[in-house]
Image (cartoon, coloured by chain):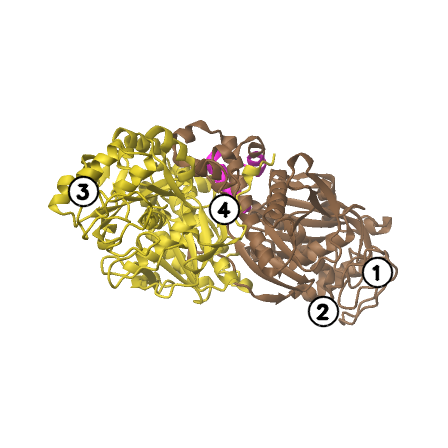
Chain colours: A brown, B yellow
Amino acid sequence: MMENAETSDQNRTTRYTNNLANGFHNPQSENGDCVSCGSDGGGLDGSDSGSGSGSNSSGGHNGIENFHHLHQDLHNNGSPAKRCKLRRRLDSGKKNRPPFPWFGMDIGGTLVKLVYFEPKDITAEEEQEEVESLKSIRRYLTSNVAYGNTGIRDVHLELKNLTMCGRKGNLHFIRFPTQDMHRFIQMGRDKNFSSLHTTLCATGGGAYKFEEDFRTVAGLELQKLDELDCLIQGLLYVDSVGFNGHPECYFFQNPSDPENCVKRPCSLENPFPMLLVNIGSGVSILAVYSKDDYKRVTGTSLGGGTFLGLCCLLTGCDTFEEALEMAAKGDSTNVDKLVKDIYGGDYERFGLQGSAVASSFGHMMSKEKRDSISKEDLARATLVTITNNIGSIARMCAVNEKIDRVVFVGNFLRINTVSTKLLAYAIDFWSDGQLKALFLEHEGYFGAVGAFLELLKMTDDS
Amino acid sequence: MMENAETSDQNRTTRYTNNLANGFHNPQSENGDCVSCGSDGGGLDGSDSGSGSGSNSSGGHNGIENFHHLHQDLHNNGSPAKRCKLRRRLDSGKKNRPPFPWFGMDIGGTLVKLVYFEPKDITAEEEQEEVESLKSIRRYLTSNVAYGNTGIRDVHLELKNLTMCGRKGNLHFIRFPTQDMHRFIQMGRDKNFSSLHTTLCATGGGAYKFEEDFRTVAGLELQKLDELDCLIQGLLYVDSVGFNGHPECYFFQNPSDPENCVKRPCSLENPFPMLLVNIGSGVSILAVYSKDDYKRVTGTSLGGGTFLGLCCLLTGCDTFEEALEMAAKGDSTNVDKLVKDIYGGDYERFGLQGSAVASSFGHMMSKEKRDSISKEDLARATLVTITNNIGSIARMCAVNEKIDRVVFVGNFLRINTVSTKLLAYAIDFWSDGQLKALFLEHEGYFGAVGAFLELLKMTDDS
């Protein structure tokens, strides 16, 4: 009758110091060298900081010295840890930065988000020496926009000309359904990914769930990272470097006036405190006080997975894109019972407009009404219901935490103008303009970026 | 794209002094004379408090004097207001109490709740003089438990041996779907209800929506009352008189231990402050500081109407009873994505058990999973989703308002043990035992009782 499983209120509040804060310095966007590499601060030229591998230290920025020696070492020499250290000097051409390939991965309940750094400053020599599997990964990822049946690169999100740990390159954003994770791990095995000895930094629940599969199937050890830590670090980083010269952040001007409601870029400069609402399969709401001080205020299990799951059931659609397309054409007022359907007009005493929803899906208890609505109406009602519920809970949290900026992220907002505008409207209207809803262009990728940043912080000692 | 209709956050908080407070004295359960009648305080023997009708005042408790004279007056004399005043002395046998029949009505978004006071102290003489239509109403209502196709008397809720305005009798609780309201109004016309000149006290949105129909179709003027005012007054009254010698209120002992979770009666004695969560078609959450001081903290459009509407769509059921019956047999974990489905276990850092729901309906985006679940599973998941969402929002409100008692009412909880236990569990678990969930036996009828109490307060002047 009453299993634990039935409790979804995800809201014990514990304040955390961000686990990822050590050694991570706030990005310096002026010089483009965005994150520190290793605990020594990550200068462009660093000497071996003493892990005792005894091998030669590399020289200039892009130089690869003693490649053949190192390459020999790689195959013949010592423990996995030692081989890994040697590899550090190999494909990224520099000590105290990890070897290529550089990935960050966020394995969520619905989607895997992968960010990949493509070095654009590879010298001819370096390219010549690059191991085949590494080259093949680079070419495969950067010359395609779709992978297999379900992998997609969000080309429009690519961050260009970043300098990270002394290497210049582009950051790519790739996603695929979590249900294809086993195929991905098998591909890692087939491509002998483990021979590259890169550290695979992964966050999201799947980093835990699939850890054993990565190890046993593909011979890969995951560096597991907390998803909320990564979310915050990734968000702050992307916001600080900007979106190819444009701001990462935007809001809606005139949110309460549909005719004149327009998207406007803005800066997150001086971002604290902020209420961060991450809408993935479920929803987490964080109060972020500084880059390494935040708490998870609450959560709700009614998130993007609820929207898509219900839409599939109610309309027979199969994908998020289909669901949103239908929702864009539907009219939720055929499905929902509005205040005016009950009152005949406004419920004035408590400031409820007749057009407000009194009971989501409230008309659907009537067979007559059920027979008169379209799938599009149902999709719209589902979207509006989930979105308003999140907006309402977020607003309550913002008021209680006394935070006036509410930042919405997560892949539920991808290609989802209905929800972003509705959230902007709801937050503005119900707070009498006291609260402001903000959005970020890279929506669902911040966890993966945060995991990627962790990779760059790893030193020989780690 | 963004109509007003899409905003359902119902949460502007304004603090109100209860409109109904004037002249309403706290029930005195010792002597059984529970509410004051009229602004003069409602003694058993009152003289005409001076509205100037000039007719004879009545004598003893149950005596009807000059009945024929009054009866003549009724048909021949003066304005509707004056006739109404005359009727006051007629069928309830007493000045300064309204004429029979005594009703209170709450016309909600889904259900009409009707309470009817059946006088049990009618003398032979009184019965003889009782007008036929009044007698017919009394006999019809008290000798049946079902009315038409959809009206139902909740016999088990009948409150016996009440003394109200000096009359002894029983309070009956009747409900029918709001969609049958027009048939009800037509019946009022057909039975010539307006000839009884009783005041019809009505609350709920339908009191506004159907006011014009009552007037034009049935010749009846409604006395419209605010639903939240009525809810509070009705609740306090029923709790104070008790449930036929037993407490009206109950809670669950050991809410976190399904094996040993048992319903226990309790008292609402010293009930303030309380967080009052009214789950009808939608949900209103009130912080109640005293009998006439409260505010509406927030609301959500995801309520009982959402549960029933979605269940009808997802399972093809037609009634609340069917929906609950299916839900009782289902397993929501086949439908919802749990924390362990994403993490492989608990998400320890933030205290989320593996068995907690991460994404309601989150499994349903997979065709394979959709093909493997039952209607019962869907019904259960719908019930659990709606219930947990309400529990979560209520918990947040309680914390913010610093109120540790959360009282859940409304017809969503009728015959709904799954939800009451789940609410009790969620409130206890997520507050670490700091908050307590309470429930009331007359669940959805308090608004109607509050409207009924207003009728008894009406004087010749009102």
Instruction: From the image, tell me which residue sits under label 4.
Output: A349
Q: Secondary structure at mark 4?
A: helix
Q: Which mark is residue A392?
A: none
Please indicate whether residue A235 sits to the left or right of residue B271 in the image.
right
Q: CB of mark 2 within 8 Å of CB of mark 3? A: no
How far is the residue under mark 2 from the one under mark 3? Answer: 105 Å
Give the residue at mark 1.
Answer: A66
Would you say residue B140 sits in the magenta stretch? no
Left or right of residue B106: residue A438: right
The answer to whether the residues at label 3 and label 1 have Cβ atoms under 8 Å apart is no
Mark 4 or mark 1: which comes first in sequence?
A: 1
Label 2: few (<14), some or many (≥20) within 10 Å?
few
Q: Report in which chain the residue with disc 4 lies.
A: A
Viewer-proximal residue among A333 and A18: A333
Q: Amino acid at mark 3?
A: Asn
Asked where in the image residue B259 lies, by quadrant, the reply is: bottom left
Disc 4 to disc 1, how far (Cα)?
80 Å
Nearest the viewer among B400 and B197 is B197
N-term mark: 1 or 2 = 1
Residue at which label 3 appears? B66
Q: Amino acid at mark 1?
A: Asn
> How many other residues sit within 10 Å of disc 1, few (<14), some (14-19) or many (≥20)?
some
The residue tagged 2 is A461
Picture quadrant where residue B3 is located: top right
Q: Position of residue A38 (x, y in %)?
A: 75, 65
Q: Mark 4 and mark 3 in contact? Answer it, CB < 8 Å.
A: no
Q: Chain of mark 2?
A: A
Which one is in front in this view, the residue at disc 2 or the one at disc 3?
3
> Which region is colored magenta?
A302-324
Instruction: Report whether A433 appears left or right of A378.
Output: right
Taking the magenta stretch, the answer to whether it contains residue A316 is: yes
